[in-house]
Amino acid sequence: MNFRDELAERAKVVNKALDQCLPSVNAYPPAIHQAVRYSVFAGGKRLRPILVLAGAEAVGGNTETVMPAACAVELLHTYSLVHDDLPAMDNDDLRRGQPTCHRAFGEAMAILAGDALLTSSFNVLAQLPQSAGVAPERVVRVISELAQAAGTQGLIGGQVVDLASEGDTVDEDMLEYIHTRKTGALIRVSVRAGAILSGASEAQLQKLTDYANSLGLAFQIVDDILDVVGDEQIIGKPVGSDQRNQKATYPALFGLDAARQKATEAAETALSSLNSFGSEAQFLRGLVQFVINRNQ
Amino acid sequence: MNFRDELAERAKVVNKALDQCLPSVNAYPPAIHQAVRYSVFAGGKRLRPILVLAGAEAVGGNTETVMPAACAVELLHTYSLVHDDLPAMDNDDLRRGQPTCHRAFGEAMAILAGDALLTSSFNVLAQLPQSAGVAPERVVRVISELAQAAGTQGLIGGQVVDLASEGDTVDEDMLEYIHTRKTGALIRVSVRAGAILSGASEAQLQKLTDYANSLGLAFQIVDDILDVVGDEQIIGKPVGSDQRNQKATYPALFGLDAARQKATEAAETALSSLNSFGSEAQFLRGLVQFVINRNQ
């Protein structure tokens, strides 16, 4: 199986688990469960949950055991997209080619759907000792790390600074601040969560953290580049939106060539962080290539 | 010390703990921390955190140990108020006599402040094993119960049905559905959290749950009554707002006298749930009287 097929295969397994961990659209009150499912199943590469599974794999863990954590990070990621899209925030009408949650269900329901996704992310994690026999101390650690990655020093902090900086000149420091929080924090906690739940040593965790930091940077730079040169049909949203919204991006700050160079360097750093791992980290290595070469 | 003074004393201790568990207004990015602190310190009786402490006390636990859990439920309660007040939801300009978060800081910041409060609620809980030496299995159980009380079968579900029913005729079943979720769920998990973290037996937990269910009902009915007959200066918001917004309430459904009767019955049930407890539940008993007799 080539890497792209394997990735699609894993995304399918994640989708099945997400389907099982969410209440049905008929569960009362149905409106909120419809909005939640609509947002979760609007597409997406499932990169973060796949990173949870791969983080477990890299330290000899069981991917099935950590699957609820994989779902938890995707729920949390989806919450952040639903709230970021709101009229008071980025005011986006489309996400992956589909109407955003608030366009489809109204603003109140989109706020509540985001709240529900965030809340259920912690609920799903808290079931791990019962559902999969994971040691509670590992679960509490992951909950703590996820909450911090999502909090005012993580995702939320990144969004606050991103909103405040629109239209301003953004320097490299601020660009890095925004990206390490809006994208990097959740990518990092995904890899770490899989590893922590599988009993990784602190040394293994440090190397996986270095890997995730570099992978997150490469991912974000490529995202910025695709917004400039990507194919609208493939990426599912209009290109050039960052420029129109005067968003800070790597290509805007450094130019396309230097941004590409930075992405390549980050990819190399990610790969070298895995030097002490053997074949169990093969999938994490493959992800680096995928992130660099992706066209969506 | 009379009960009202003791309540004020406990609220003061809770406020101090809340102050310590939140980042300072100067923490970067300051805007979000200002909005969070503004919302948390806009007043409030601190009933829920005080119930956490009293739940611990009733089973011989240490109130200092469970204080972070007391803060967690108040942060979560505050998140629900901030989001409920938003223009897309109840569109309230005032809360406890002060401009609501979105009136003071804008809509985007209010959405993010609510998100931050919800997230930090779980983060604060997840620190309990490290900060207070509480067994991780108890902490995970409380996180699970809090997430469920806040989720689509709890707070969020109640808000969805409440929004959907505005202007409709609401029968007793639906009124009960809304109130047990919007008010009851968090009151119940507050008492249970304090008790669970303190090692309560399942039998003790069941009785405290019965107590909390009845207390929550009494609290809600009195709230509804105060919206009809309360003193605007004392309760800090215009009276009659439920009627203007065509909200379902106990007085609207049953009339004032029958609503008062129901509140008294719920209070009696709450008290009798504590029959097997001794003086360690004296504060929980006092709370029943307070809830019934309050004028704000």
Image (cartoon, coloured by chain):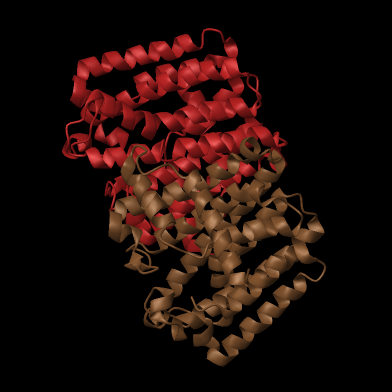
Chain colours: A red, B brown
Residues B79 and B162: in front is B79
Q: Nearest the camera: B279 or B144?
A: B279
Please tell me which residue lies in front, B271 or A77. Answer: B271
Residue, x 62% and y 71% (percent of image)?
B2
Image spot of residue A280 (x, y percent) = 59, 15
Choose top left, top right, bottom left or bottom right for residue B202. bottom right
Q: Position of residue B77 (x, y in %)?
A: 50, 58
Quarter of the figure with residue A56: top right
Q: Looking at the rendering, in which quadrant would you find the N terminus of chain B?
A: bottom right
Q: Residue furthest front?
A: B1
Q: Position of residue A11 (x, y in %)?
A: 50, 33
Q: Kindly tell me whether residue A270 is visible in this rendering.
A: yes
Q: Is residue A144 left or right of residue A163?
A: right
Query: Which residue occupies 58% across, 34% down?
Result: A142
Seen in the image, is B110 located left or right of residue A287?
Answer: left
Dividing the picture into quarters, in which one does residue B187 lie?
bottom right
Q: Which residue is depicted at the point 55% across and 50% down? A: B72
